[in-house]
């Protein structure tokens, strides 16, 4: 397996991985980048087009796990300020409202093809996401994973990643956010 950045060249691999529904319900990994009204308005084709434009730009968006010639996984990782929903989220609100977030990067979601689940693809993507953030100047990488200790969950509930995966990768639980979520961080710079 190799991991590559989303670019104009790798866009067809993401398009194939996400399929006609854009991963889930026309999201195309635009949920955190848009306000609720924008996302609702753009769900489907407009989100696909925005994701394609992002791939064609120089703006970081995420990484793909490739086996052979097929994409089997995706992780969204970018500077926290591009994810407009995070500041308003009770789960992802800033740890310190006065903190300079310009060098904080966020891992917001994973999408692993059902044929590749349970094989460490998400963990590989997480490790590469941290390296990618460091190469682009991040000081801190944070995420908002799900704590699976409280019971079984569907794959649709795990798109943030699991708390144990992040702590196993050296992230620290900064704060529990509700009964099933946490904010985790890793200082990298």
Image (cartoon, grey):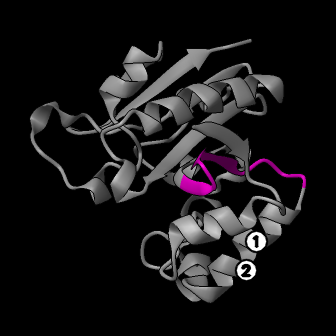
The residue under label 1 is 52
* Residue 102 in which image quadrant: top right
From this viewpoint, which residue is outermost toward the front? 68
Position in image of residue 63 (x %, y %): 66, 45
The part of the chain drawn in magenta is: 58-71
Q: Position of residue 9 (x, y in %)?
A: 83, 60
* 173 over 158 or under it: above or below: above
Q: Position of residue 105 (x, y in %)?
A: 67, 34
Q: Residue furthest left?
A: 151
Structural distance between the alpha carbons of marks 2 and 1: 5 Å
User: Is 148 located above or below residue 9 in the figure?
Assistant: above
Residue 61 among magenta residues: yes
> In the displayed structure, would residue 50 be above or below residue 107?
below
Q: Can residue 100 be seen at all in this image of the molecule? A: no
Label of residue 49 in the image: 2
* SS category of the residue bearing label 1: helix
Residue 15 shown left or right of residue 60 in the figure: left
Categorize mark 1 by other alpha carbons within 10 Å: few (<14), some (14-19), many (20+): some
Q: Are marks 2 and 1 in contact (CB under 8 Å)?
A: yes
């Amino acid at each position: 397996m190799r991991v590559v950045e989303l670019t104009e060249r790798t866009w067809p691999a993401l398009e194939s991985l996400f399929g006609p529904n854009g991963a889930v319900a026309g999201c195309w990994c635009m949920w955190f980048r848009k306000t609720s009204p924008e996302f609702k308005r753009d769900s489907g084709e407009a989100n696909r087009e925005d994701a394609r434009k992002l791939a064609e730009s120089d703006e970081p968006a995420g990484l793909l796990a490739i086996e052979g010639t097929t994409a089997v996984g995706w992780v969204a990782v970018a500077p926290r300020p591009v994810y407009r929903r995070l500041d308003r989220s009770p789960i992802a609100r800033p740890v310190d409202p006065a903190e300079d977030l310009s060098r904080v990067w966020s891992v917001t979601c994973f999408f692993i093809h059902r044929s590749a689940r349970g094989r460490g693809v998400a963990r590989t993507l997480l490790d590469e996401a941290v390296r990618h953030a460091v190469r682009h100047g991040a000081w801190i990488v944070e995420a908002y994973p799900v704590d699976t200790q409280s019971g079984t969950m569907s794959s649709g509930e795990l798109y943030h990643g699991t708390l144990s995966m992040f702590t196993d990768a050296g992230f620290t639980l900064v704060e529990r956010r509700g009964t099933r979520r946490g904010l985790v961080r890793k200082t990298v710079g």
